[in-house]
Image: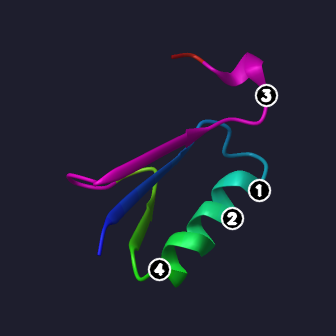
Amino acid sequence: MSRVLLIDLDDKLPNLALIRLSTYHKQAGDEVFLNHCLKPDIIYVSTLFTWNKEL
């Protein structure tokens, strides 16, 4: 079982990519966390609009 961290850089609108990743990992038996987790095994970061990206 993996600990999966999903980071949504634009939290005002639902992010379909992160929702689908969450469903996939939950069905695989992984623990899924949104925007915070201690020592994750897998990290996904997504934003809907490029002007929200500040990395």
Q: What residue would you read off at disc 4?
A: 28
- The secondary structure type at the circle numbered 2 is helix
Q: What residue do we see at 20% from left, 52% from top? A: 39
Whether pointer 3 and pointer 2 mark residues with C-beta atoms closer than 8 Å, the reply is no
Q: Which numbered marker is on residue 49?
A: 3
Q: What residue would you read off at disc 1?
A: 16
Q: Earlier in the sequence, mark 4 or mark 2?
A: 2
Inspect the magenta stretch and tell me whether residue 39 lies in it: yes
What amino acid does circle 2 point to?
Answer: Arg
Q: Earlier in the sequence, mark 3 or mark 2?
A: 2
**For the residues marked 4 and 2, what is the alpha-carbon distance in whole angstroms?**
12 Å
Question: Along the line of sight, which residue is nearer the eye, 28 or 18?
Answer: 28
Q: What residue would you read off at disc 2?
A: 20
Q: Earlier in the sequence, mark 4 or mark 3?
A: 4
Q: Earlier in the sequence, mark 4 or mark 1?
A: 1
Percent across and percent down for residue 40 are 28, 54
What amino acid does circle 4 point to?
Answer: Ala
**For the residues marked 1 and 2, what is the alpha-carbon distance in whole angstroms?**
6 Å
Q: What residue do we see at 67% from left, 63% from top? A: 19
Range shown magenta = 37-53
Whether pointer 4 and pointer 1 mark residues with C-beta atoms closer than 8 Å, the reply is no
Q: Quadrant of residue 4?
A: bottom left
Q: Which quadrant of the figure contains the N terminus?
A: bottom left
Percent across and percent down for residue 28 are 47, 80
* Left/right of residue 31 with respect to residue 54 in the rendered view: left
Residue at the left extreme, as displayed:
39
What amino acid does circle 3 point to?
Answer: Phe
